[in-house]
Image: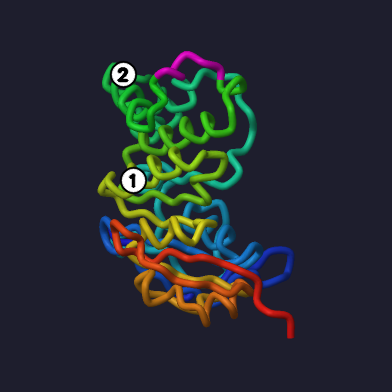
Amino acid sequence: MRVDIEGLAVDIAGARLVEDIALRADSGQFVGLVGPNGSGKSTLLRCVYRALRPAAGRVLLDGDDLHALTAREGARRLAALPQESGGEFDFTATEVVAMGRLPHQGPGGRATAADAEVCAAALARVGAAHLAGRGFLTLSGGEKQRVLIARALAQEPKVLVLDEPTNHLDIAQQLEVLSLVRESGVTVVAALHDLNLAAGYCDALYVVAGGRIVASGPPHSVLTAGLLAEVFGVRAHRVPHPVSGAPQLLFDRLPLA
């Protein structure tokens, strides 16, 4: 499913935080948002998963205005993993993942055996099948993140919106989760903090600074020393990954003026 963001602007408490955003993710693409803290990445993504309504512009899914869809229809097409998961629930991991099936159930919300199979498969895909009967509140940060990713996968969306999905994960888990998401076949729009992970897994990057897109394109053309100095305030040295050839970055401080 293709995602198009056209002329998006977001106002909060009278302040414009995001301005004139244009973004395109073709079906099956993994598109990354990168930028310094406070640049507007999470605000933009909150519009994409309907936690915020834009002051201007549209989010289109295969040409349909996302904000014109019913909540159920929108949830059948798009799932999200926000940076903050919200309230802490005294449910088992399986019960948390089962929440992802609600858009596919009838008015009574009765789960079926097929729903249970989807949830079990989602937990297995993220390497968390052994957590099925554990209470969510007893899990570590990384375990919770895996369960929440499983919930998004159990929703069987066509589009995944992820805000810092590798938070709380160790490096092996980060690589496993991003590989899983990339291989899922769905369209992905994700904010990523680690530029090397973004370079290794994304088909295209959009660089956000001051609430605007300041650069976009394939990682090798976007992650230049000049842009990284301007946007992130660091000196970057690019080297190719010895296996994939993707650009990898080594950083040090810019010399003081």
- The disc at residue 112 is 2
Q: Amino acid at mark 1?
A: Ser
Residue 5 visible within the image: no
Q: Quadrant of residue 247?
A: bottom left
Residue depicted at x 45% and y 43%: 174
Residue nearer the viewer, 230 or 30: 230
Q: Which mark is nearer the camera, 2 or 1?
A: 1
- The image quadrant of residue 127 is top left
Of residue 83 and residue 139, the one placed in the foreground of this image is 139
User: Badge 2, how many Cα within 10 Å: few under 14, some, many 20+?
Assistant: few
The residue at 48%/42% (across/down) is 171
Q: Which mark is residue 179?
A: 1
The vertical placement of 8 against 79, above or below, is below
Query: What is the chief secondary structure element of the magenta stretch?
Result: loop
Q: Which numbered marker is on residue 230?
A: none
Q: Is residue 120 above or below residue 161?
A: above
Q: Residue at x 74, y 86 (%)?
A: 257
